[in-house]
């Protein structure tokens, strides 16, 4: 196939969004950027001390990537407001989606959040949550979702997406194709949602369809199993859910990413995960904790791109999508 080592490394690394330990540009981060060619990094509470520290960290990481001749980094955070907000005071603290009652509320949250993220060098927000928690279900997501039906969730979620992106912050809608009906936590278990595609089209998928129409930068897949959609693979590893449903039937051509591959909902080894991710036209795997999974994923992507011409072609498409979004948001 006549592919250089450099292009293989770039094609592999740009498929990985990685977590790390520490609050500064340390050797672990340099390794992630220079040796892994990672497309981006994810900030958690363990990486955050103060606005000044975050600004220095983000600036140093971007400068190091540039020095290494690599594309600029996605720098992401979960800043939903409420129970999931990695940035604490003096950043503005919002009460979260259950307390957003109007388009004006949504616009205010997104505008303030976008300003504060951009001020410190964060360019991607893993928000909004577009899951629907039906009445009568003790949803695991009840403290993180907008109130109301699919139409209201779309209305509020779209306003957040548009406002974040108008202000230079990439929005990532989650958790496709919807986990609001689940009562188990995929951080700890593999939840199973026994719903058919027809019902999803009339409910849970509606906000994601609307997000696609508004060119949301990214969509995050859930780790939930939907046996009536795919008997074998959960959403984050499913060629049908990520490929056929999201890419082909919905026509989404933005970034598709997994949720954290270190969650206990993942019951197969990392090599198998990577093979499914590549087959499913998923652009980026999120691996949020240091450990052997990062190197295993990187080397397995390289191996699969070497061995399978079809996966190599899909890989080129993913790289083009990633670089296109980076050019739009990170290079003016």
Image (cartoon, helix red, strand yellow):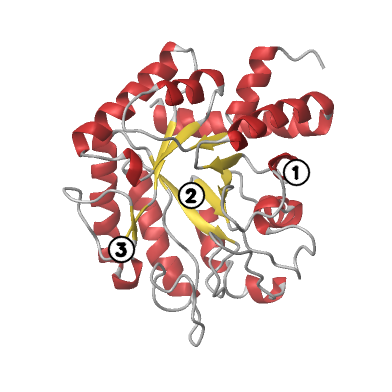
The residue that mark 1 highlights is 272
Q: Is residue 250 visible?
A: no
Which of pointers 2 and 1 lies earlier in the amino acid sequence?
A: 2
Instruction: Select label 2 or label 3 by which is in front.
Output: 3
Quarter in which the C terminus is drawn:
top left
Q: CA distance from mark 2 to mark 1?
A: 29 Å
Crowding at dot 2, Cα within 10 Å, few <14 / some 14-19 / many 20+, comes out as many
Instruction: Select label 2 or label 1 by which is in front.
Output: 1
Q: Residue furthest front?
A: 291
Question: How many numbered marks does the figure carry?
Answer: 3
* Residue 113 image position (x, y, % from top left): 27, 49
Give residue 82's mark. Answer: 3
**Disc 1 and disc 3 in contact, CB within 8 angstroms:** no
Instruction: Select label 1 or label 3 by which is in front.
Output: 1
| Residue 313 falls in image quadrant | top right
Give residue 216's mark. Answer: 2
241 w.r.t. 319: above or below: below
Crowding at dot 3, Cα within 10 Å, few <14 / some 14-19 / many 20+, comes out as some
């Amino acid at each position: 196939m006549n592919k250089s080592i450099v292009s293989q490394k770039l094609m592999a690394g740009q498929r990985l969004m990685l977590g790390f330990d520490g609050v500064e540009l340390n050797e672990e981060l340099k390794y992630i950027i220079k040796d892994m060619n990672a497309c981006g990094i994810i900030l958690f509470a363990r990486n955050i001390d103060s606005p000044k520290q975050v600004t220095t960290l983000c600036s140093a990481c971007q400068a190091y990537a540039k020095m290494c001749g690599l594309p600029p980094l996605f720098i992401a955070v979960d800043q939903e407001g409420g129970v999931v907000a990695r940035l604490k005071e003096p950043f503005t603290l919002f009460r979260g989606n259950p307390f957003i009652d109007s388009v004006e509320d949504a616009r205010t949250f997104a505008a303030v959040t976008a300003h504060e993220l951009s001020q410190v060098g964060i360019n991607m927000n893993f928000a909004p949550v577009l899951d629907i928690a039906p009445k009568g279900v003790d949803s695991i997501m009840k403290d993180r979702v907008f109130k109301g039906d699919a139409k209201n969730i779309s209305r509020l979620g779209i306003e957040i997406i548009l406002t974040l992106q108008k202000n230079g912050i990439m929005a990532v809608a989650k958790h496709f194709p919807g986990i609001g009906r689940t009562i188990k936590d995929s951080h700890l278990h593999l939840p199973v949602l026994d719903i058919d595609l027809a019902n999803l089209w009339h409910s849970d998928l509606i906000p994601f369809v609307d997000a696609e129409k508004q060119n949301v930068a990214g969509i995050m897949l859930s780790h939930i199993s939907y046996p009536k959609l795919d008997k074998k693979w959960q959403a984050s590893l499913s060629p049908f859910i990520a490929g056929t449903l999201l890419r082909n039937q919905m026509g989404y051509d933005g970034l598709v990413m997994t949720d954290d591959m270190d969650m206990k909902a993942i019951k197969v080894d990392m090599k198998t995960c990577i093979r499914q991710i590549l087959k499913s036209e998923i652009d980026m795997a999120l691996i949020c904790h240091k450990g052997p999974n990062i190197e295993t994923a990187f080397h397995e992507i390289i191996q699969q791109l070497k061995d399978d011409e079809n996966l190599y072609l899909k890989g080129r498409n993913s790289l083009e999508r990633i670089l296109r979004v980076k050019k739009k948001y990170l290079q003016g």
